Each structure stands twice: as C-alpha cells, then as structure tokens.
Image (tube, rainbow, N blue to C red):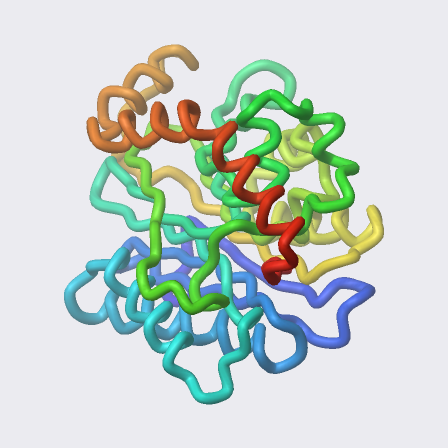
Amino acid sequence: MQGATRSAGATHPGYRREQNEDAYWADEQKGIWVVADGLGGHHAGELASKTVVEEVQQSAATDRHYEQALRKAHTLLLGDEHCTANMGSTAVVLAEEGDYFRIYWVGDSRAYRWTPGGRGGELSQLTNDHSYVQMLMDSGAINPEEAASHPNRHVITRCIGGSANPNLEIDRVSYQWAAGQKLLLCSDGLCTEVPNEKIAQILAENTDNHRAVDLLIGAALDAGGRDNITVQIIDAPPQAPALCSTSDAHSRAVHNKPPFEQLQGLSKRVFAALLVVAAVTMAIIGLPKLL
C-alpha cells in the first residue's frame, strides 16, 4: 500500500480454499482503494481479480476514470482465450476527491461507513449486493435472517467477466466525509462470517487500522474462514468537516447522491419482483449460475 498513513489492508486465503483469489491495492496519494474477489476457481479467479486491480492501477496513473477501468477489465476478461463461462471478479472501488468520495461496485464485495458515537458507533452498508439473495430480500420474499442461511447466498447476479454479455452495469454512490469516520472495503469472506455488530465493535475499539484489519480477518477465521478474506480500512482525511449528528451525515449523503442514482434505486425496487422471477426462470431452464 503506497504511502499509507490513513489506511491499512490485508488479505488471507481462509481455511477452506487452496489459494487466494482475492486481490487489493491502494494509493493514498492518489486517493484510490480497490478490493476484487475472483470467481471461477484455481487460477481463473486469481487472474480475473488481478486484471481488475491492474486496470484500476492504470487508471489511477492516467485518467482516473475508474468506471471505464472496470469496463475495460470486463472486456479483457471476455476476450481472454483462457476465460471460461464462470471466470470473473467482483469489485468495489473507493475514489476520493478532497472531502468527497465515490464508490463503484459490481457483485457482492462491499463498502461500509463507520461513524463514531455511542458504544460501538454506527456501521452503515453503502453498497447493495448484486446477488440472488439480495433480489429476494428486495422483493420481500425473505428477511435478512433467512438470507444469512439461504442455500444460494453465494450466487451473484453481476460480475466483471463471467458471461458473454459485453455490457457491464456498474453501480455508484457519492458521499461527503465527516471527521472521525472510517470506510471499510471487503470481500464477502468477511461479511458472510462476521456480523455487523462485531465489525462495528472492532472498529470502535481499535484506532490503529492495521490492528483493526488483523482483528477483522481473525474474526472471520474464527467463524470458519470458509472463503478468502480481504479487508481495507480508510480514515477520513484530516480536512474532513466535523460531524454534528448521524442524521446530518445521512442528509449530506442524500444531497450529494446524483439524481440518476436516486432514480436507479427506485427502479431497483420497482423491478425487484420481476428480477426474482427472471432468476428463478433461469434456474429452472438450467442456465449457468455465477458462483
């Protein structure tokens, strides 16, 4: 991690996987962090996540168009002669500009914001998973407790590469930093093993980001370590404005969220039920799932 003073990151293969298909990278001076979780098994997933990180690195050094970087990675993976139908990667990217930051994501790698206050602070998930289980929750078919143990909880509906679809849909949100906040980027090897309350507690009790990263990975391993685990934690920049209240943070986030993203959220809710029907139909007719 280049010039790291505000952030820390680490990755671990877990206890059940032969190798680590996750990848991550950061450059604080350029204000860019990325976590990618490869799919496809063995070297396929490793190559896919590496491709995503390399394109983000290239973009950081040139145009800083990170959305286009993810699209280029998608095109490269689709055009790779070694690419299989299930070879792909999820990604979550944090791009910072002064007091503001934007998050881009595809798949079920996540971004969280931790805000100090109370006993453990407040942990808010800033991304929504592109997954079959998330569609079921959006439609009201299941609740979060049922989602945690759903047999298809690892089935994702969108990734970089992984299909013959040349068009990649990327979600994005924008927020303003507030003093004392932290951002957490992670692969699903953390969030499927460690509950939000435990994550918030570790962030609240450990101001040293390196120690917090180690403790989060340790908590995922203690819970079973069934997947690769990657974590990055980033402190708010020194110039971030003071936070008056949690509601103030929420209002600034909504205000700074582009209108098209608000409409996108409405569209997701409107069409959630239709998406569930489509997913079930695909399963019935035997189309491949991305695992």
- On-image quarter of the C terminus: bottom right
On the image, the x and y values in percent for residue 146 come to 75, 29
Identify which residue is drawn at 15% across, 65% down. 63
In the image, 190 versus 84, the foreground residue is: 84
- On-image quarter of the N terminus: bottom left
Left/right of residue 76 with respect to residue 127 in the rendered view = left
Residue pushed farthest front? 285
In the image, 62 versus 71, the foreground residue is: 71
Asked if 44 appears above or below 262 in the picture, the reply is: below
On the image, the x and y values in percent for residue 139 come to 55, 25
**Tally of numbered tags:** 0
Left/right of residue 219 with respect to residue 51 in the rendered view = right
Left/right of residue 73 with respect to residue 88 in the rendered view = left
Identify which residue is drawn at 50% across, 48% down. 185
Asked if 174 appears above or below 94 in the picture, the reply is: above
In the image, 229 versus 142, the foreground residue is: 142
Asked if 166 appears above or below 115 in the picture, the reply is: below
Identify which residue is drawn at 60% across, 28% down. 137
On the image, the x and y values in percent for residue 143 come to 68, 23
Identify which residue is drawn at 29% across, 21% down. 254
Q: Give the quadrant of residue 72.
A: bottom left
On the image, the x and y values in percent for residue 164 come to 42, 68
Left/right of residue 278 with respect to residue 152 in the rendered view = left
Residue pushed farthest left? 63
Residue pushed farthest bottom? 81
